[in-house]
Image: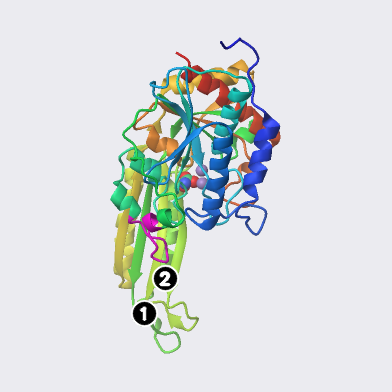
Amino acid sequence: MNEPRNLSIDGDRLWDSLMEMAKIGPGVAGGNRRLALTDEDREGRDLFVSWCEAAGCTVRVDAMGNIFARRAGRDDNLPPVVTGSHLDTQPTGGKFDGVYGVLAGLEVIRSLNDMAYETDHPIEVVCWTNEEGSRFAPAMISSGVFAGAFTLEEAHAKEDVDGVTLGAELKRIGYAGDMPVGGREFHAYVEAHIEQGPILEEEDALIGIVTKAQGQRWYEYTLTGQESHAGSTPMDRRRDALLGAARVIELVNAIGMEYAPDARSTVGMIESYPNSRNVIPGQVFLTSEFRHPDDDVLAEMDAKLRDGLTKIADNIGLESEFEQIFYIAPIVFDERCVSAVRNAARARDFAAREMTSGAGHDACYIAAVAPTSMIFIPCVDGISHNEAEDISTEWSTAGGQVLLGALLELATN
Ligand code: HGY
Ligand code: MN
Ligand code: MN
């Protein structure tokens, strides 16, 4: 029987695991490069699976390569309380984005084992595939399949820039599991993650009680003009695709600024063809994205973009192919799960504040199929998606303690 006592995680062990995982897929500036379903991702997954098995978990992999490590509850027929995040990184990613949530979840299991503490509901830690949406767009695609936002077939067919499909890579690295994706109940899902912004650190808060997440729209453009000679083509005779792209970049930024302070707008990728210094670019591929906590504003931004793009193309004489490749509505997280996080922070007297997530997370899709909330910890200067991403051991341990408390509240009937 569980005696009431000071239940705690082992912050040093969590930190050591984070540093061990960080050795896999090193970046060039101290961070990590473990793009989804690469050999580096496989190595990180294999290490995580070995740690889960050493912790006595049963490990299952579904058809999207999502890894579920399960610690039995008193009544194993009860739906699990789930935590976790992702191990894939951006090309110039940090050591903690996603990884923190996966390993903090494992640390909770390791600590419950140490304390021989039995929960009523089983507890599972999940590693979601391709959360970043960097190698295979869009982001959070595997939790998206789990939540029914994408079919398994369309997700498996997603291609990287070399035309390699997500499905083929799952098979190649040995993570094409046979478990169906989704269709099973989570009693609750709580994801721990670094904030990836400056608020908590600036306010000296240890914990973010995440109540909402903003909506997103991602776009792809192909602007087609005409290659021609840089020296002999008069300025009024050009159909310069890169000039068009430059105006799109300005337009995307102007719309973001118009809806500041909450809006976010970014052009992330651009490829100019033929990319020769004395040829007027004939074709440009670029991407952009909008984010906002209010769906109506996001729709207004979308309409302004479409209108502005048409004017730019007409003015320069470009053909423009334009596609919205991803949309996720703003999320309001579940009050029972949010209060479990709030209670856990309060029980430890941690400075905490409620907030909206600027970044997308797997929790955003899981919120559609299970009661869900998130825990944020600060990160240094709010920097993320950058190899300099950093956290303190104090922040790491505090987040783990709150995750333990929240999961115990939700896993106890
Ligand atoms: O783009 C995002 O918000 C997340 O990092 N995938
Ligand atoms: Mn992340
Ligand atoms: Mn990320």
Q: Residues within 10 Å of mark 2 (few under 14, many from 20)?
A: some
Q: Is 191 on the left-hand or right-hand side of 22?
A: left
Which amino acid is tagged 1?
Arg
Residue identified by numbered label 2: 243
**Percent of width and height locating residue 393:** 69, 35
**Percent of width and height locating residue 302:** 33, 49
Nearer to the camera, 11 or 51: 51
**Percent of width and height locating residue 136:** 41, 55
Which residue sits at x=60%, y=52%? 386
Nearer to the camera, 105 or 55: 55
Nearer to the camera, 311 or 369: 369
**What range is drawn magenta here?**
157-168
Q: Is 156 on the left-hand or right-hand side of 340?
A: left
Which amino acid is tagged 2?
Leu
Report the disc number at residue 332.
Answer: none
Which residue sits at x=29%, y=64%? 321
Residue identified by numbered label 1: 238
> In the picture, which quadrant includes the N terminus?
top right
Labels 2 & 1 near each other (Cβ < 8 A): yes
Is 164 magenta? The answer is yes
Q: Is 368 on the left-hand or right-hand side of 272?
A: left
Q: Residue furthest bottom?
A: 232
What is the spatial separation of the Cα atoms under label 2 and label 1, in whole angstroms? 10 Å
Q: Quadrant of residue 229?
A: bottom left
Helix, strand or loop at disc 1?
Answer: loop
